[in-house]
Amino acid sequence: MAFPIEVSDLRKSFGSTRALDGLDLAVARGEVHGFLGPNGSGKSTTIRVLLGLLRPDGGSATLLGGDPWRNAVDLHRRLAYVPGDVTLWPNLTGGEAIDLLGRLRGGLDRRRRDDLLERFDLDPRKKSRSYSKGNRQKVALVAALASDVELLLLDEPTSGLDPLMEAEFQACVLAAKAAGRTVLLSSHILAEVESLCDRVSIIRLGRTVQSGTLAELRHLTRTSMSVETVRPVPELAELPGVHDLVSGDGRVRFDVDSAALDDVVRHLSGAGVRALTSTPPTLEELFLRHYGESVPEPETAR
Amino acid sequence: MSALAGTGALVRLALRRDRVRLPVWVIAVVGLLMSSVVSVTSLYGSTAEREAYAGAVGDNPVAVMMGGPGAGLPSLGGIVVFEVAIVGYVAVGLMSLLLVVRHTRAEEEAGRTELLRAAVVGRWAGPGAALVVAGAANAGIGLGVGAGLVATGLPAAGSAALAASFVVFGLVMATVGLVAAQLTEHSRGASGIAAAALAVFFVLRAAGDIGGGTLSWTSPMGWALAVRPFAGARWAVLLLPLAAAAVLTAAALALLDRRDVGAGLVAARPGRATASGGLAGPLGLAWRQHRAALLGWGIGMFLLGAAYGSVGESVEELVSQNDALAEFVAGSGTDLVDTFFAVATSMTALVVTGFALQVAVRMRGEETAGRLEPLLGTAVSRGRWLAVHLLVAVAGSTVLLALGGLGTGLLHATLTADPGQVGRLTVAALVWAPAAWALTGVAAALFGLLPRAVGAVWALLAAAAFLLLLGRTVQLPDWAVGLSPFEHVPQLPSEAVSAPPLLALTAVALALAGAGLLGFRRRDIG
Ligand SMILES: Nc1ncnc2c1ncn2[C@@H]1O[C@H](COP(=O)(O)OP(=O)(O)O)[C@@H](O)[C@H]1O
Ligand SMILES: [Mg+2]
């Protein structure tokens, strides 16, 4: 089972709302997979289908080699889930909620639990109702990370954490990866995805618009360049792959498709390069580019 | 007054949220009351019929428990009061307390009050708006019932007095709800406390009316009846419940001024850092979620049963004092005390079914609150989770019935020096369990198949209560009365046990639960 999660052409509608419209997703064993998309694009719906909480209208989803709907209970012994919006039982303390969730999954590692409580600076003796959003999330995170499972399904797990806790969270995910666990991380925090994820899937309106390693995704985007040359560069604007060219006071600024980078640099050097700055595409630009545009046909770069 | 700033906006918000709920309550209560008024007026058209009615019920303690002191008998207005007033007080009381808790503590528990109080909204605006909304609903019922009574040809003054007694009793229960909402952090707990107060008011009044009337003056329900609508209405008595409502409102606001948003009267203490061994599975969690309620209900049911048990003796005395009645009882072969206990126990059964339904409906609450999702994300199956909650509902309601019967039995056994009564009356209460299970089954089926409609079981319980209490009065056909599961329960101890209907009800409950399970395993969560 090289792919703990394999989803293809998944469709799910709620009445007239089409939440998933042919979504594809493949998460390889041992990787941290980033799951990106704007609000309402279908990330949580996908994860709920994978948990057997929702029944898909079409397409296929395989989780840990099984059918998420029919084998739900057995599969759930092997995974841990952190919902995007954690609601706890108001009259249970955080510690009780952690133990309960752990036991329901088939046990949790006591030492790891206590260590995580310390790292996340969480008081387990407080009643759940008095926890802030971030602390409720910590309860779910501790319960998930302290479980001995193969797969972690994390749905925007850090949206309520402060930067210190965010750093702890990243360390924990990397430790989980080092221990051989697979992680599906739906997130809005691009810096987090950039520093944690091996591969990323970007979805929009219930479809996968791009999927691949960060390097591959970067390849699909443009680098911004600013160049100062001895002589004016002839016909730069006409070169394939060059966009949004602005020139003035001996400098030119433009964006260039990653694929055309080599040709453009060769062309520039003919004019005598005096200074050159290039900014590689950030995930954020990638993200904004996808969401600024109208829906592109799905491209894949696996 | 800045404490009331924003009340108008909150009233509009509440009316917007309850734009369906409020009309439904008003129409249902007015419809419930008017349907029995119409049938009463058609049944007792002649003076002879009215005299016969008054003769039959006036000294009958069972009838007095359910109907009141019978002021105004044998006039038609008096009969109407006897037949509908108490059902009406219970209905407007429940409506009022539920509405107020819904718009105060439930909002606070959900965290929305915090958002509102951060705006230009005064501390008292929420309670103020809740009382305005409850007042409006009661006024609607008062107007509807008043107009209906006059339209059926009853005297205007008496009709107005009866309608007004509904309104003021509703206001008392609204303010009781408001006080309860200050005491506990949970809306369910607040509703439970207020409903327990309603039950106490009923029992005090019933005991008072059976025992000569003095005790009735300790109960707002007794005050409402003391207005004596069609027997020379005593309007001044209305001031008593109004004063009580004012005092209760002041008490609630004083409590509110002394506490934090979201808090109850008792401050939260740190709890356990690790879960005890019992909190290991869905059953442990369900037990933890319901045990406090079960304890509260258990005490309540035992006391309610004990109250009935303590009254049973006076029934016997009354019968022996009244030669005609004693002869009638001896002649008919039925024991009036046993009939009294059978009717009293059927009331307990209706209330206990409320507990079972509360547990069953809670399943949907857990789902929509998002607490089911993380559980089903673990190795807990849907079937196990559903089964565990139904087990709490079924076992819990059975235990509550037993406690009610035990309360009645212990008191009655002590008063009559007959220890055999303990077991006999406990069994008499337990026979009602299959009826409670059947309605629990309906809730389970709805939860599995039509989750959004789960709340409709409350309407079904109300309908079953109507059929049990008034079905015969309004002369519904047998098949219609037979729709209620309670109708099929042998009325112990005055009737003999008979297994087939109990087995049939149990089978219906199982079939419905099975249907719910199948539906639940097939549908989306959330
Ligand atoms: N239970 C539901 N009923 C109706 N619509 C839903 C439900 N769950 C999700 N949706 C809709 O499906 C779409 C995808 O939602 P979701 O998966 O929660 O997005 P994301 O997690 O990416 O923010 C949204 O338009 C949302 O409104
Ligand atoms: Mg989401």
Image (spheres, coloured by chain):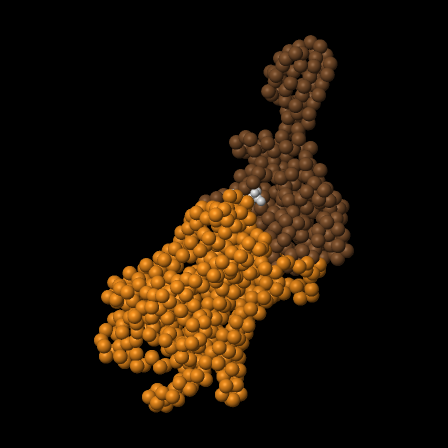
Chain colours: A brown, B orange
Q: In this view, does A81 lie to the left or right of B476?
A: right
- The one nearer the camera, A227 or A31, is A227
Looking at the image, the residue that sits furthest to the top is A231
State the image coordinates of residue B414 (x, y, percent, origin top left): 52, 85
Residue B525 appears in the figure: no
User: Number of numbered discs present?
Assistant: 0
Q: Residue at x 62, y 48 (%)?
A: A133
State the image coordinates of residue B516 (x, y, percent, origin top left): 49, 63
Q: In this view, does B83 lie to the left or right of B204?
A: left
State the image coordinates of residue A207 (x, y, percent, origin top left): 55, 39
Residue B291 appears in the figure: yes
Q: Residue at x 56, y 66 (%)?
A: B293
Give the image quarter of residue A301: top right
Q: Residue at x 55, y 72 (%)?
A: B299
Up/down of A14 relative to B382, above or below: above
Looking at the image, the residue that sits furthest to the left is B46
Up/down of B210 relative to B190, above or below: below
- The one nearer the camera, B18 or A8, is B18
Q: In this view, does B90 lie to the left or right of B185?
A: left
Up/down of A8 relative to B336, above or below: above
Q: Which residue is drawn at 54% across and 62% down?
A: B189
State the image coordinates of residue A189 (x, y, percent, origin top left): 65, 38
Q: Is residue B406 left or right of residue B45?
A: right
